[in-house]
């Protein structure tokens, strides 16, 4: 399968910035979509941003103009640049990737839908 590892979370003051990274590894054939999700305490997980292999991106309205998603296809890595952070951005941020991988044991290519372990982002004075 495909493994995702996130990094870059932490504690930041309101108005500050953080950059999250999500590195994918494994027998990756292709990564179609990479996305960032977040879940705050007591709330449902919500989609923050997605980016296609061609670079097309989408954002939830609450982060438009403040967050930027990008990806380095050569490194199988996605990034989330978060600026002008607000206390309501506090959440566990998780990375998701969908695409195709090669199953060497069984000798076939199949789809995957993988999640990272999550990284905590806390915005507080």
Image (cartoon, helix red, strand yellow):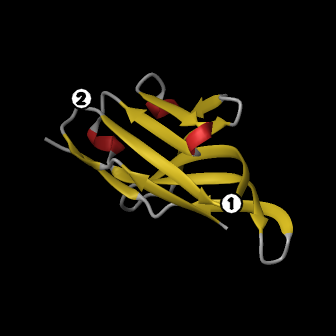
Residue 15's label in the rendered image is: 2
In percent of the image, x 58 and y 58: which residue is there? 25
The image shows residue 111 at horizontal and vertical percentages of 78, 60
Binning the other alpha carbons within 10 Å of mark 1 as few (below 14), some (14 to 19) or many (20 upward) gives: some
Residue 87 as seen in the image, left or right of residue 65: left
Residue 38 as seen in the image, left or right of residue 18: right
Residue 80 as seen in the image, left or right of residue 77: left
The image shows residue 66 at horizontal and vertical percentages of 40, 26
In percent of the image, x 85 and y 71: which residue is there? 107
Residue 69 as seen in the image, left or right of residue 55: left
Classify the position of the C terminus by image quarter: top left
Q: Quadrant of residue 123?
A: top left
Sequence-wise, which precedes: disc 1 or disc 2? Answer: 2
The image shows residue 90 at horizontal and vertical percentages of 32, 48
Relative depth, front residue between 116 and 45: 116
Residue 113's label in the rendered image is: 1
Looking at the image, is 9 positioned above or below residue 83? Answer: below
């Amino acid at each position: 399968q495909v493994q995702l590892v996130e990094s870059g979370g932490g504690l930041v003051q309101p108005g500050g910035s953080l950059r999250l990274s999500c590195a994918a590894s494994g027998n990756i054939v292709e990564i179609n979509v990479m996305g960032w999700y977040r879940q705050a305490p007591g709330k449902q997980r919500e989609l923050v941003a997605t980016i296609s292999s061609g670079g097309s991106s989408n954002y939830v309205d609450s982060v438009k103009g403040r967050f930027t998603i990008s990806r380095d296809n050569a490194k199988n890595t996605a990034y989330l640049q978060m600026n002008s952070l607000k206390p309501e951005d506090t959440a566990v941020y998780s990375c998701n990737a969908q695409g195709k991988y090669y199953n060497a044991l069984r000798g076939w290519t199949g789809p995957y839908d993988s999640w990272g372990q999550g990284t905590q982002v806390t915005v507080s004075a």
